[in-house]
Image (cartoon, helix red, strand yellow):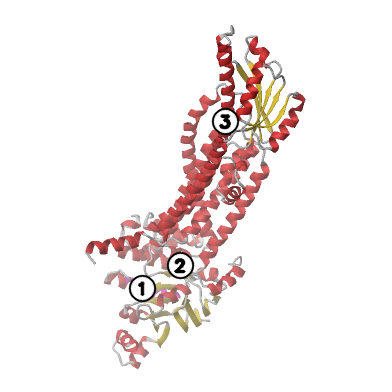
Amino acid sequence: MAAVEVKNFSKNYGKKEAVKNISFNIEKGEIFGLIGPNGAGKTTTLRVLSTLLQITSGSVKIMGFDLENEPGKIRRQISYLPEDAGAYKNLTGRQYLDFISNFFERKNKKKMIEIGIEIADLEGRIDSKVDTYSKGMKRRLLVGRALMVDPKLAILDEPTSGLDVINAQEIRNIIKKSAKNGTTFLISSHNMLEVEYLCDRIVLIADGEIVEKGKPSDLKQKYNADNIEEVFTGVIK
Amino acid sequence: MSALTNIIKKEVKELLTPATILPIVFVAILFGSIGNTIGDIGEEASQAPTIALINEQNTSYSSIASKIIYNNAEVVYNSTDISNKEIAFEKLKEKEGIALFIIPKDFSENIKNNNPGEIEIFWIMEGAGIMNSISSSSVENILWIINNHISKTLIKDNSSLNASVVLSPITRSETTNFKGIDFKDVSPSVLIGMMASQSMMIPIIMMMIIIISGQMVISSMALEKENKTLETLLTLPIKRTSIVSGKILASAIVGLFLALIYMIGMGYYMMSFNIGSSIGTVNIDLSMSMFDILLFGILLFITLVAALSLCMLLGTMAKNYKSAQTLIFPVVLMSMFPMFITMFTDFDTLPLAFKTLLFAIPFSHPMMAPRALMFDDYLFVIGGIIYVSIFTVIVIALVVWIFKTDRLLTGSINKNKIFEYRKKFFKR
């Protein structure tokens, strides 16, 4: 059974078709990349798979659960990190992680918070108010929040957005490590180098439709490109 | 286009939105409606009061009194026989009159014997609002004229009576009938005054609780959206109903706590007025029993939850913290309207359209309940509890439904899914 099964999925906003009849599968433990230009339908797809938006047509199954009928069960399997997510400003980093951990099993709570603090790596600022964090610190805290719950599927929209090179690399390493431990990742990114480094397979989406998909190495070969960025520009143009 | 014109045009466009215009339109309509109601009462007050008269002996001074009553009031029943008291009372009720005057046989005789003549007054009080005391004041005015005329007559006749009797030749004994209960030796104005603390305090406190807690709920929703924390919250393993009820209950707790602080302060403030008014009044039991307090507490809590649910519904429309500030306006108006109405008038004396409107606004019920409980009108209070509960359940269901649709994040609803969601509502 695939971790994610998307069949003929479409999403409309009124008359506008944001995603048009797309299908793909993500295997367990796989890091799957969703790339495309702005307004292609990436975030809409991620929001639908995160149970935030309703599907217009088609079907989506996550860990065997149907998105339309069992959203509650899906929420127990996933962790979603929106691109421009925030944290509660009046809480400290630790309090925020504690607040999130309370929605999960009590017995794992302490360990969960420790993992979150470790991933966030805020160097002594974990007990400072979120309001005082820099953009990069907030993002690290949010990545920590998303991964500390040990999700079956982590849906990350621009996971390293706002991070410097060193922090971004650390986050990528954490994603790789988590994937090896069995977590499935669905990632959207504009950073093609990141996608190439992280993803086992990618789907290129443009104007709501899948225009290309495959392993990064196969795509590079197919388009005779040195990197995914060249594949991307080649396909989109 | 000059730079200044360009800026003005942009600013006006930004400021003149439906969110800014609609509240002002609502306020204008609200004050217009209240003005009309108060105007109607004022008009009623300027008319001659409707009364019944039993004058047992039409002699010198009682004749003066009778004449003045006829000149200044609309007398719907007149008799000289005291045994017709019940008939007079029935006639008065039928004609929506306000007082039955009984001038006893010994009225003139008493004055001549150096004792003030006593007029018995049986008041029929329709409502206990401040504006309701206006109608009784026109009767008070008649009594003043009677006193004045008899006094002038006594002076003119060079009466050898005591100066105090000459200046105040009449006295009165009165009984006020309100909601079927007879209050002996109490005038309507005293009764209204005694109930004024409830009339003033509870509506103001209720309005304050609703506005304070409502603002918290709407702001909380707006901040979730502005700080981009809502999306994360919605993907956590937590039921939508838990998110909605958690937010509502938290605000209700904080709102009640703040109201408690406010009530203590307001209580001390109102007590300063009550000390003076209680002196010299008779002992009237208008207190609430434990059962009454329990009913009132239930109603108060349910109404608060209703208000917060409504605010939550409005909060789902908030785009950011700034827009949340204007969204509270409908709730403010909905609490101000019953506040003014219950402070100045009585539910029972309102026209049917206003009664319906007041009953339909859930916030009216705790404002009207204390008076109803004092007079054991349990049907009205329990009816209110049932109505507000149904209202609350519907609004919460609507909020939860919005939380399950795209509306919360995108501002639109997938119409094709509406019917499917209705079916699945209780499954999720």
Indicate the quadrant where residue A229 lies: bottom left
Q: Which residue is mark 3?
A: B138
One can see residue B328 in this view: no
Q: Which residue is mark 1?
A: A158
One can see residue B82 in this view: yes
Are both tags, 2 and 3, on one chain?
yes
Q: Which residue is mark 2?
A: B411
**Disc 2 from disc 3: Cα separation:** 57 Å
Indicate the quadrant where residue B7 lies: bottom left
Query: Where is residue B15 shown, x and y percent of the image?
Result: 35, 59
Q: Are marks 1 and 2 in contact (CB under 8 Å)?
A: no
- Does dot 1 land on a helix, a strand or a loop? loop
Query: Where is residue A219 shown, x and y percent of the image?
Result: 36, 89
Q: Which residues are magenta?
A: A170-183
Indicate the quadrant where residue A116 lies: bottom left
Q: Nearer the viewer, residue B89 or A167?
A: B89
Position of the N terminus of chain B by quadrant: bottom left
